Amino acid sequence: MQRSGLRVTTAITGLTLAAVTALFAPSPALAAEAVVLAKGHTDAVDVHYEDGALKLKVKDDTVSPAVVRDPADVTFQVLPAAETTVPDLPAFTFLGAPGSKVWMLPQVQDAGLLWPGWNTTTLKSGVFAGDRVSLSLVGVDGPGDVTLFDTNSLGTPSIKFRSNDGLPDRLDVPVHTHAHAGWVFSKEGAYTLKFQADATLSNGTTLSTGPVDYRFVVGDLQPGGGDLSLSITGMADGEYQPGDAVTLQAVQSPQGALTKYQWFSKKPAEEDFTPIEGETGASYSFTATRALNGSQYVVKLYDGAKVVATSPESWLWVAFPPEGSRTAKTVTATINAADGALVISVDPEHRNVTLPAAALSPAGDRWESSGALQPVTVTDTRAAKPGWTASGQVADGFRTEDGKTFAGGYLGWTPSITSQGTQQGVVAGPVSSPYGTVQAQTGLGGSTVLATAPNGRGLGTAQLDAALKLSVPTDTAAGTYTGTLTLTAI
């Protein structure tokens, strides 16, 4: 029997000394710039149901926060490093003669290649007949054949779409599904893959996206298409509220190996852009204040000392604070109005964490998946500097819609400090390994420290993160599990 991979969606909320905010799951922002995606995770065929219509989009997780794109704005590049040969195994003859060259984006993530999949997690239960939609590959235009297949835990392949034996090919996909497969191209060059989604509403109404073009380039980009451009994503179209977290991301198109950046800002009263000290990574995070209203930001990409690309300006707009109210983002803990406040917050774009489909561990005795918590901000304005501790816990475990469960202790983390003030003294919490992988450790089933600031320190704003690791026994039932990670700061 084929076993589907586990996917865990961890919804993040926060608990404070005074109140708990409502939990919700915002959609990623919609981006409109043309990009080339060549490395990292993307839900290439991302199914949405909006305003009574079925739509196909691209969820781009190669940037943080993730953005949703129109397929017309995306070129998917299968890098030359994807070249491999067809194995000399009878089960894989559908890919061609043994030893022949193919270019494959594998089912299991390779950090040096693109990792595309399909996704129906935005679709709600009860909307569609049978709680499923159909994805079809209805056409392929290109120099070679295209095959999508996956393998079960024993390595047996299962073909999902294949162009050389007649199209369309149709795949029924349940809602709440996030899946990956091997994407195999038999020759280098430019391809257009036409995908289509179809569904029947619970009232009998039929819906279809019609054929939607997806552009792939196998090998190097075509002449004239390889000029490097740099853009900034993550800036809201409207106004931020004072105290909101802002996370900007530099996006190369096409993606390349260069990783040296410098962020620059220009405030309204300044004549020129000035470098932001210490901000040399692909992302830049800060807190919106009214004083920053009208500021501009650019980022430059370097090859050694040479600037090879500069982004267009990105403008920040910050509203006046609502009269008679406090500024609160995600979760606010008020100690005393006269003594300052302790605030732990999660940007709305980061309140959903989706781990990749679980794969067998090297020892073959666990289903495992890894991901990132994404930024958590702690701000302490208390003049007394009593210190603080930020912790997390998945107290109620994980559950599928049909009632299957496993304990929160099977999720662990390795905390880290992304940024902090020079005198803040914040220290990352200890590694907490998933239950059953390290003796006497119980993961996030109990309250586990993310970071601490000692007495006399902690004043200012710190950004925290953690590498997440899920590890469950192999007899865990397959399904889509959701848990709530509660964050506290005291």
Image (cartoon, rainbow, N blue to C red):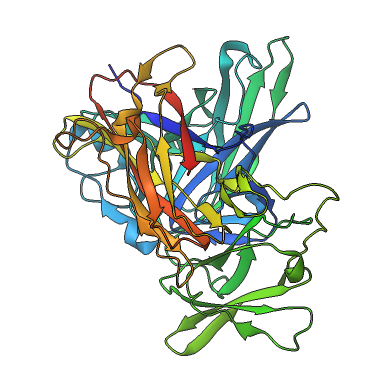
Residue 382 is drawn in which quadrant?
bottom right
Q: In front: 63, or 104?
A: 63
Q: With respect to residue 85, does 411 lie above or below? A: above
Residue found farthest to the top:
203
Residue 94 falls left or right of residue 392: left
Image quadrant containing the N terminus: top left
Residue 381 pos. (x, y %): 58, 59
Q: Quadrant of residue 197?
A: top right
The structure residue drawn at horizontal position 39% and vertical position 24%, both measured from the top left corner, is 397
Seen at 21% across and 35% down, the residue is 441
The image shows residue 230 at horizontal and vertical percentages of 59, 72
Say which of 85 and 381 sits in front: 381
Q: Is residue 186 visible?
A: no
Q: Residue at x 34, y 47 (%)?
A: 109
Tell me: residue 51, above or below residue 414.
above
Query: Which residue is more in the foreground, 183 or 29?
Result: 29
Examine the rendered structure and indicate whether residue 229 appears above or below residue 323: below
Asked whether residue 470 appears in the rendered view, the answer is yes
- Name the residue located 63 percent from the left edge and 33 percent from the top edge: 24
Left or right, 293 with respect to 469, comes to right
Tell me residue 211's x, y (percent): 65, 37
Q: Is residue 311 left or right of residue 44?
A: right
Picture mark count = 0
Q: Position of residue 310 (x, y in %)?
A: 61, 79
Picture quadrant of residue 27: top right
Identify which residue, 225 or 328, lies in the foreground. Answer: 328
